[in-house]
Image (cartoon, rainbow, N blue to C red):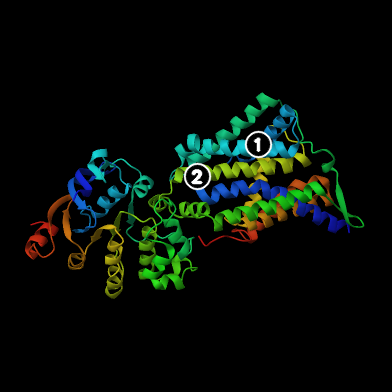
Amino acid sequence: MTALLSVTRLDAFYGAFQALFGIDFELRAGESVAVIGANGAGKSTFLKALAGLVRSRPDAIRFEGEDVGDRSAPQMLRLGVALVPEGRRLFPSLTVEENLLVGAYSGLRPQPWTLPRIYELFPVLRERRNSPSTILSGGQQQMVAIGRALMSNPRLLLCDELSLGLAPIIVEDIYRVLPQIKAGGTSLIIVEQNIARAMRHVDRFYCLQEGRVTLTGKPGSVGQNEIHRAYFGA
Amino acid sequence: MAWLDTVVQGILLGGVYTLFALGLSLIFGIMRLVNLAHGDLIVLAAFLVFLVMASFGVPLAVATLLTIALMFALGFVLQRAVLERVLGDDIMPPLLVTFGLSVVIQNGLLLGFGADSRRLQAGAFETLSVDVAPGLSIGLAPLSALIIAIGVIALLQMVFYRTSLGRAFRATSDDTQTAQLMGIDHRNIYAIAVGISLAVSVIAAVAFGMRANFDPSTGPARLLYAFEAVIIGGLGSLWGTLVGGMVLGVAQTIGARIDPEWQILAGHLAFLLMLFLRPRGLFPARQP
């Protein structure tokens, strides 16, 4: 199977500060991959580069056979890459339903995720559809953020720290929907600090440390010690 | 009855001030941009309507529609070509650029049209009025300005709260970066917002140009009235702006009734009083 996404020697900068150093990464269609690493390892920057919020060399990122490293965020969304941003970032002046609808703004791919399907996935959101997004609980806000990204019917969904600030039981609720998202034909990259949780939900993982890939493999095929070394440095 | 007449005329005048204020309020609400050239853009629109009528011999209504299309396009280009370059975290550069634009428009109009004052002619419609009660008659032109102001607000509200474009406006205003993740190109959203602001300014220009003379130096005072209406009404609320315009209009006509020289002063005093009593305006949109 050919790669949906392939990243080659990706460098990323914030002004003069370099956050990523020569990242190589590959994802096949239908795959789910975790990116793990400590704070400041470059995980969020990596997702931002894929989503077009941080620009890079055109050929550093290939998506469906096209060089897209220099595309803007709206262009990447049109190509089928959606990001659930860290901290959810819902629009406070929009209701829950309007937040979901704004996710379908481009209107390019109307299927399979529609408003009714999102409400099936997260029934609690239907009850709160007309509430301002700001009064929801953290878990419900995360559901809106995921639903909003799904409304664009992405080929690739990027999830940045879904568990941030949520109680463990809520986090499991959120992670339970990932198989349904995959079943809809969407590939996944999830960034997660909790290694054990990440490993339970993905086909493969990459570990980042200080902006470099230090380890990659399949959950279960790599020993704890090796992961810890890649995560924290020896 | 004379006092009632004064208040009614003030409310009607408020319709014109509301139209001045809407475009300003719109751009500030979506882009946090204070457009110091807003008054001059209104005067520019009035001259354009005047020019279209004189050149093509079309009636006022047709000239207005043509100018609305023209000013929308001008607003779109102005944003993409000029304002976009200075918008950022610092509010000073856009402020300076719109201030410069104000000077450029005033002098450009002076060059093109001279310093003579003009008026938009609407024929018999200007003088038509209905007698509501003995001693109280309402001019159709001012009345239609108020009705149109209400209609424009209703239309803008519908766009903001019922359409995909409106959601994009509000989302961009909330969080530009996250809006981009939704596929919203904020540069186009801003350009459309400025376009709509200038299109509304044409309606303001016509309502104003039918009831008073204008010349190239008339703009800054229009900007001041627009500001006052927005602040009295409360930032970010279009219906509040309507009330703000009316408060300003009524204050001015009451002032003028006491002494004609007090008209402008009374409006400013009402504004200052409001700043003193309710600094966030009558209907502030949301808590800071």
Read off the residue under disc 1: B67
**Regarding mark 2 in the picture, which secondary structure is present there?**
helix
Q: Which of A33 and B94 is in front in this view?
A: A33
Q: Specify which label sits upstream in the sequence, 2 or 1.
A: 1
Q: Residue furthest bottom?
A: A169
Read off the residue under disc 2: B190
Name the chain under label 2: B
Q: Do the residues labelled 2 and 1 touch (CB within 8 Å)?
A: no
Q: Do labels 2 and 1 share a chain?
A: yes
Name the chain under label 1: B
Label 2 and label 1: CA atoms lie apart by 20 Å
Q: Can residue B217 be seen in this view?
A: no
Q: Is residue A191 visible?
A: yes
- Tell me the quarter of the image containing the C terminus of chain A: bottom left
Residue B47 percent location from the top left of the image: 69, 33
- Reply above or below: A152 against B123: below
Identify which residue is drawn at 55% across, 37% down. Answer: B98
Q: Is residue B139 left or right of residue A19?
A: right
Identify which residue is drawn at 52% across, 40% down. Answer: B95
The kind of residue tagged 2 is Tyr
The kind of residue tagged 1 is Thr
- Reply above or below: B155 against A61: below
**Toward which corner of the image does residue B235 lie, by quadrant?**
bottom right
Residue A99 percent location from the top left of the image: 44, 60
**Regarding mark 1 in the picture, which secondary structure is present there?**
helix
